[in-house]
Amino acid sequence: MTTLAIGSATPATPVTPAAPAAPVTPAAAATQRPSEGSVHSWDLSTGVDGPGTRFVTFLSGCPLTCLYCHNPDTWRMRSGKRTSADDVIAEASKYVRFISASGGGATVSGGEPLLQPVFTGELLHRMKHELGLHTALDTSGFLGVRATDALLRDTDLVLLDIKSWDPDTYKKVTGRPLRPTLDFARRLADLGQEVHVRFVLVPGLTDDPADIEGVAAFAAGLGNVSRVDILPFHKLGEAKWQALAKPFTLHDTPSPTPEQVAAAREVFLSHGLRAV
């Protein structure tokens, strides 16, 4: 039998506690470097970018060229400021208590946020998991194939713009085909993702009864649309078009009357949808 003399054992080497691992965010996993994106601006808004008061990050770059766009200065990604996700999160963190008290959250908008899917995913992930905020993605759905399942898991609500049901009208309004948006809407329905549909009512353009009926029937058939926002056309962004030396072709188009908006709302209500 081997006898070990007391005091003859080699002293154990002190173990230094390992530093906590950095959180693995979608952008870190995809890029292995700090996430940056082209940001147009950020702002606090109430009632128009999701429920409650919200911190809204507007990203630059959009593949659509909507005739009534009120932010044409967001169309080009290079027009934005290169900004880190850390900077956006730091700014949003200043308002967390105020936002939470209002039942609000954070929205990533544009432009089109899915033109920068890694950066968008990073913002949504960190807004939700670091700041504890309700998250929303404001999108046309045209680039819905770029939204990963991970990005959508970090999204509590999708604000989906369906500009028209008629493919020709949709192409006239946006310069792009309708089908990708409808495909994305069906994918969101399959995932059980909550959606608010947005429909801009433009006299002489999207106010055809068959057009409104088509959007309403489609939205009702999805089963995951909890609200429809009927947005009356306005010309508040016309000055931006002029500043960019772009022709605003809807200059002579009037805003819809309250009666026209009410009639459109009734169509959505008749399909069992909550319409405002």
Image: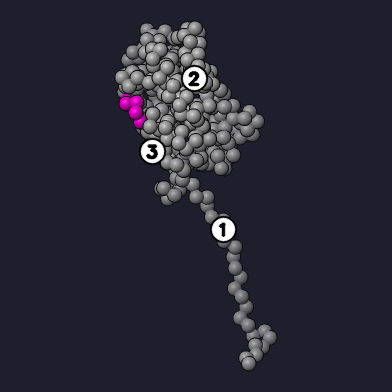
* 131 lies left or right of 109: right
SS for callout 3: helix
Distance Cα–Cα, label 2 vs label 3: 31 Å
In the rendered structure, which amino acid carries the disc numbered 1?
Ala
Tell me which residue sits at (42%, 16%) in the image. Answer: 212
SS for callout 1: loop
Is residue 61 something that shows in the picture? no
Is residue 184 something that shows in the picture? yes
Q: Which residues are magenta?
A: 176-180
Tell me which residue sits at (43%, 15%) in the image. Answer: 201
Q: Between tags 2 and 3, which lies in front?
A: 2
Which labelled disc corresponds to residue 271? 2
In the rendered structure, which amino acid carries the disc numbered 3?
Arg
Tell me which residue sits at (38%, 29%) in the image. Answer: 182
Relative image position of residue 47 (x, y in whole percent): 56, 23
Instruction: Tell me the colour scheme of the image.
Output: one colour
SS for callout 2: loop
For mark 3, what is the residue? 146
Whether residue 275 is situated above or below residue 83 in the rendered picture:
above
Counting labels gives: 3
For mark 1, what is the residue? 19
User: Does 232 appear in magenta?
Assistant: no
Which of the 4 image quadrants contains residue 130?
Answer: top right
Question: Who comes first in sequence, dot 1 or dot 2?
Answer: 1
Mark 3 residue crowding within 10 angstroms, few (<14) / some (14–19) / many (20+): some
